[in-house]
Amino acid sequence: MNKRITISNANFSDNKLLLHASESINGLIPTEQILVDSKQFSFVYLMENLEGYTYIDIPEPIWPLLKETLTKRIPVWIHFNDGELELTNFNEELEYVINNIRGNSNYGEEMVTKVEGNF
């Protein structure tokens, strides 16, 4: 069963970006993949377990922090009640996705405009 967790809060702490999840992600494994939701204007980091995927939605208000992680090569972690977990390969994958979106109308004009404006 697939589920979504939307990140509504993030901050820098101990030289890493913490994305705050509203529910536990115990047992989930990072897939090192980022998708794009051009309708909701978010980047989606995939995590998985035996039951399916969990989509970690990172909406546009969080993007300025993501830009800083790219320029300074700061690791990205997800923080939840039970602890923290690094989202491995995050910056490399985000950089790849952003470069793919730039000037690519397949993502929709508004998504391209937002990505180009933020990154």
Image (spheres, rainbow, N blue to C red):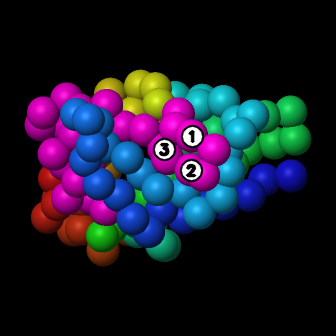
Q: Is residue 64 magenta?
A: yes
Q: Type of residue at label 3?
A: Ile
| Amino acid type for the residue under numbered disc 2 | Phe
Magenta range:
62-85
Residue at point 81%, 42% (across, down): 52
Is 36 above or below relative to 29?
Answer: below
Q: Could you tell me which residue is drawn at 56 percent across and 50 percent down?
A: 80
Label 3 crowd bin: few (<14), some (14–19), many (20+), radius 10 Å = some
Q: Disc 1 designates what residue?
A: 83
- Residue 24, image x, y percentages: 68, 51
Asked if the residue under mark 3 is in contact with the one under mark 1, i.e. CB atoms within 8 Å, the reply is: no
Q: Could you tell me if the residues under marks 3 and 2 are in contact, i.e. CB atoms within 8 Å?
A: yes
Q: Residue at x 71, y 39 (%)?
A: 26
Question: Residue 13 appears at what percent x and percent y?
Answer: 27, 43
Q: Secondary structure at mark 3?
A: strand
- Relative vertical location of residue 113 with respect to residue 52 in this rendering, above or below: below
- State the SS at label 2: strand
Circle 2 residue: 80
Q: Are marks 2 and 1 in contact (CB under 8 Å)?
A: yes
